[in-house]
């Protein structure tokens, strides 16, 4: 081999290894497991590729498809983190509108990652074959690679976690859609049930510290901040997205493993006491393939989903729920009723929630980077306005039909920030904020004449039991001594504090728009 041929091959070796190194680094970063992969993690993955590159067929028919899978997830992983049960479940439950909104949250630069990853791996494969770079024949290199590979199983973690999460979701949805949920509550009774109508309002993505009622300096919750009733500061959600949280909060869950129990769901419990149930929702309903939440909703006596059929992909305002509520209230009924209103609230992208509602600040008078913060705090004000109007309709019905009432508002989970020099995004990113679990909780009843605020820990994992006690339901499987709105803290957090401590992120407080 001539000098120039040797130089050319050495150059190809160096260039191929550089391509492999940076491709592996980008790929691992894109999984979300390793935002800043260590040198060792990069070399482990690169070493595996070098071994598998011994066969042209293995590289192109096995390795390359795996690389493409990683690359396609990279734009999401760079922003939202690793795949998990929560994200896989969200994919099953997301309609086309939410998918569009979700993808639009990703920075444009993220879409360059798949191109770079695939391009660098293709270039590595091409150089290896063109210049016959048989790395796998170097015994020293093989020994080093072997040590790295047996030290940990980094390269397979993405595939393993994704597969495990997918199987878990598939089993859960299969159970919900192919088998009837067995009601294990048995017979319940009403004891000291004080009101005629009980209304549960489920908010969406509204983090506690962005509410003026909880200290945010912008007065975006005039109703919740001033109305007579009980405000709880210390209520925690069951999870960091709608499904993960509500499947625990709307059932009597397994508090050791943090798993929902659909056979002990809230709707069946309330029905077992002879209370008529209604579910009015502005969240998506997919029909044949129920999500865990719509499966619980479908247990209700009457169900109204604004986002179904032709309106599946419509951006429908929460205010559209009010006529549906009015229709239910006007129906003649002698016994007690339980009504759920499931809002779309502050679901990202929050600016799209404001098509029929003004923003608190003029976008032209604030710095451009606070655009999304303005939308978020305005969407919370819209929800507060919604609560005010619900209360007004219930009060009107009290005067007209003499039906007393009590209403509760809470949010399913909070959100997190992604902050750059020029932009602040507020989105759902599990594992990136310790404040995901901090949610508002407010109760107001027709006979309230005082306001109480309690700074006290309350666990969302006790929510179904607490709601039953609020209504006055007695059942052998319930703890009758629990009170969601007392000044006494829950004695057990079921490992939540430990779970939050494991989140490897700095504190993520609410952001105030400077004036």
Image (cartoon, rainbow, N blue to C red):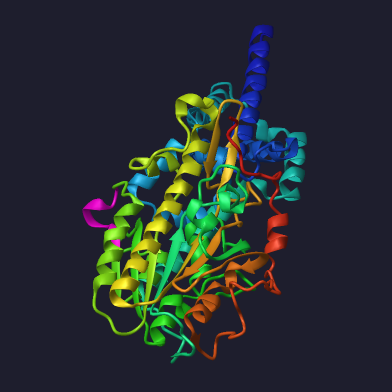
Look at 60% across and 57% down and name the residue there.
437
Where residue 298 sits: x, y (%)?
34, 71
Q: Nearer the viewer, residue 438 or 324?
A: 324
169 w.r.t. 209: above or below: below
Q: Foreground: 378 or 113?
A: 378
* Span of residues in magenta: 305-313
Pick the quarter of the image with the N terminus: top right
Where residue 297 sits in the image (x, y, percent)? 37, 69
In front: 304, or 92?
Answer: 304
Locate residue 432 relative to residue 62 in the image: left or right. Answer: right
| Label total for image | 0
Q: Is residue 125 visible?
A: no
Is 312 in the magenta?
yes
Residue 125 located within the stretch drawn in magenta: no
Q: Nearer the viewer, residue 211 or 352?
A: 211
Q: Is residue 414 left or right of residue 471?
A: right
The answer to whether residue 21 is visible is yes
Q: Residue furthest left?
A: 310
Question: What residue is drawn where x is 56% and y is 68%?
Answer: 450
Q: Position of residue 506 (x, y in %)?
A: 71, 44
The quarter of the picture where residue 31 lies is top right
- Which residue is painted at 56% across and 42% down in the image? 218
Quadrant of the drawing holding the C terminus: top right
């Amino acid at each position: 081999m001539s000098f120039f041929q040797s130089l050319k091959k050495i150059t190809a070796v160096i260039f191929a290894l550089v391509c492999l190194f940076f491709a592996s680094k980008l790929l691992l970063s894109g999984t979300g497991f390793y935002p800043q992969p260590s040198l060792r993690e990069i070399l482990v993955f690169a070493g595996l590729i070098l071994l598998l590159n011994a066969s042209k067929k293995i590289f192109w028919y096995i390795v390359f498809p795996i690389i493409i899978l990683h690359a396609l997830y990279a734009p999401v992983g760079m922003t939202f983190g690793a795949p998990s049960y929560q994200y896989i479940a969200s994919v099953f439950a997301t309609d086309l509108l939410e998918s569009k909104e979700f993808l639009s949250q990703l920075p444009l630069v993220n879409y360059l990652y798949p191109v770079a990853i695939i391009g660098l791996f293709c270039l590595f494969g091409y150089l290896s074959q063109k210049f016959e770079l048989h790395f796998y024949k170097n015994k020293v290199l093989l020994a080093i690679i072997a040590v790295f590979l047996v030290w940990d199983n980094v390269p397979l973690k993405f595939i393993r976690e994704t597969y495990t999460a997918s199987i878990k979701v598939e089993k859960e949805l299969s159970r919900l859609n192919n088998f009837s949920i067995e009601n294990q509550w048995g017979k319940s009774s009403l004891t000291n049930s004080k009101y005629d109508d009980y209304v549960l309002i489920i908010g969406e993505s509204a983090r506690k510290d962005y509410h003026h009622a909880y200290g945010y300096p912008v007065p975006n919750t005039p109703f919740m901040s001033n109305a007579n009733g009980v405000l709880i500061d210390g209520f925690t959600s069951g999870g960091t997205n709608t499904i993960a949280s509500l499947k625990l909060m709307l059932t009597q869950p397994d508090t050791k493993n943090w798993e929902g129990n659909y056979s002990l769901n809230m709707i069946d419990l309330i029905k077992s006491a002879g209370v008529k149930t209604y579910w009015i929702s502005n969240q998506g309903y997919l029909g044949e393939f129920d999500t865990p939440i719509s499966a619980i909703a479908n247990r209700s006596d009457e169900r109204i989903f604004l986002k179904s059929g032709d309106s599946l992909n419509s951006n429908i305002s929460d205010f559209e729920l009010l006529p549906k509520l009015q229709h239910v209230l006007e129906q003649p009924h002698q016994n007690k009723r339980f009504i759920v209103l499931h809002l779309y609230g502050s679901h990202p992208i929050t600016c799209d929630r404001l098509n029929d509602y003004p923003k608190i600040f003029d976008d032209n008078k604030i710095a451009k980077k606070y655009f999304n913060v303005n939308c978020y705090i305005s969407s919370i004000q819209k929800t507060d306005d919604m609560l005010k109007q619900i209360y007004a309709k219930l009060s009107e019905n009290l005067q007209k039909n003499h039906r007393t009432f009590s209403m509760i508002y809470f949010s399913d989970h909070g959100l997190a920030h992604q902050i750059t020099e020029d932009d602040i995004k507020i989105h759902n990113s599990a594992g990136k904020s310790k404040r995901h679990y901090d949610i508002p909780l407010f109760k107001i009843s027709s006979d309230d004449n005082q306001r109480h605020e309690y700074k006290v820990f309350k666990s969302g994992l006790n929510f179904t039991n607490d709601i039953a006690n609020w209504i006055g339901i007695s059942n052998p499987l319930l703890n009758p001594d629990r009170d969601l709105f007392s000044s006494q803290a829950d004695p057990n957090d079921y490992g939540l504090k430990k779970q939050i401590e494991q989140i490897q992120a700095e504190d993520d407080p609410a952001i105030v728009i400077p004036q």
